[in-house]
Image (cartoon, rainbow, N blue to C red):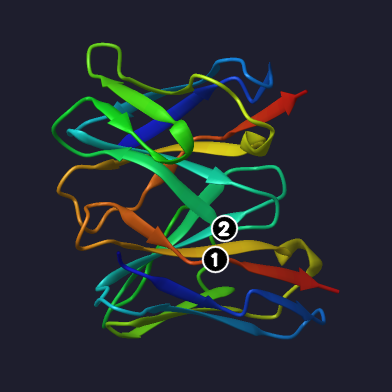
């Protein structure tokens, strides 16, 4: 099946710095990828839909200037958390539609801790 | 638009007992339905999915779910719980044949299994 690789799996950064998270489709081309955020003991909330070669579509309430999404190729989407603050600490997960089985494949997630 | 409601944020069963996790969906188009499991500090693992065809879907680890259009439900069951089944379970929905749409998750149900 389709595989999505997400990196890093965990990161600790200082408040005010920026962090980039990468999501790669390893064996298929993903024209669309999705970014989710998960707070402890909560569900996955869709943040944005990343479209190759065009601007991402953000969900209501998500700050596009804080969460920069770039989808420059058919196999790579990146999420950059800019000027991170402790409240941005969360679990971030990327996903892509599995072209072979009609489902979705997920990255393993990135645990971001801002100190 | 799609949405999912998981009834019961926390379900407790004894080892060997029946597991029943409830999920109702709302969708303006024919739905694709999914159940995922998440263990602490890990990503999502697909248990099973319904796209088309047989409405009773069998998944991994002895789980199964039945798509009931008349009841807009997709409840997850397992005949006999095992201690290793203790985890967070998410029901999710997307629109059939809508390649650019994200998966929408329910709030999750925490399954506890006691010996």
Secondary structure beneath disc 2? Answer: loop
Q: Quadrant of residue A29?
A: bottom left
Q: Position of residue A108 (x, y in %)?
A: 54, 66
**Label pair 1/2, CB-CB below 8 angstroms:** yes
Spatial CA span between label 1 and label 2: 5 Å
Can I make out residue B57 in this image? yes
Q: Position of residue A114 (x, y in %)?
A: 79, 73
Residue at 65 percent across and 29 percent down: it is: B111
Can I make out residue A61 in this image? no
Q: Compare residues A100 and A91 and report the one nearer the observer.
A: A100
What residue does disc 2 label? Answer: B43
Residue at 32 percent across and 82 percent down: it is: A75
Residue at 22 percent across and 31 percent down: it is: B28
Quadrant for the C terminus of chain B, please.
Answer: top right
Q: Answer left or right for B13 relative to B67.
A: right
What residue does disc 1 label? Answer: A108
Q: Chain of mark 2?
A: B
Q: Position of residue A31 (x, y in %)?
A: 24, 73
Residue, far top: B70
Residue at 22 percent across and 52 percent down: it is: A102
A30 w.r.t. B69: above or below:
below
B47 w.r.t. B30: above or below:
below
B41 w.r.t. A44: above or below:
below
Same chain letter for marks 1 and 2: no
Q: Position of residue B86 (x, y in %)?
A: 67, 35
Q: How many marks?
A: 2
């Amino acid at each position: 099946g389709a595989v999505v690789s997400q990196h890093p799996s965990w990161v600790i950064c200082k408040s005010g710095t920026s962090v980039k998270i990468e999501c790669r489709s390893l064996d298929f081309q993903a024209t669309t990828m999705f970014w989710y955020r998960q707070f402890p003991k909560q569900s996955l909330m869709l943040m944005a839909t990343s479209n190759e070669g065009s601007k991402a579509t953000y969900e209501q309430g998500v700050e596009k200037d804080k969460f920069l999404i770039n989808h420059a190729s058919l196999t790579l989407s990146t999420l950059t958390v800019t000027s991170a603050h402790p409240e941005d600490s969360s679990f971030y997960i990327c996903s892509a539609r599995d072209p072979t089985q009609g489902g979705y494949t997920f990255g393993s997630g990135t645990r971001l801790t801002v100190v | 638009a799609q949405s999912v409601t998981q009834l019961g944020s926390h379900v407790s069963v004894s080892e060997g007992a029946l597991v029943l996790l409830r999920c109702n969906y709302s969708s303006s188009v024919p739905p694709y339905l999914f159940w995922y499991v998440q263990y602490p500090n890990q990503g999502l693992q697909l248990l099973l999915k319904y796209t088309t065809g047989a409405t009773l879907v069998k998944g991994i680890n002895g789980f199964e779910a039945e798509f009931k259009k008349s009841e807009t439900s997709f409840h997850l069951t397992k005949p006999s719980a095992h201690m290793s089944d203790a985890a967070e379970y998410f029901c999710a929905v997307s629109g059939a044949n809508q390649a650019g749409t994200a998966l929408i998750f329910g709030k999750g149900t925490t399954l506890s299994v006691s010996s």
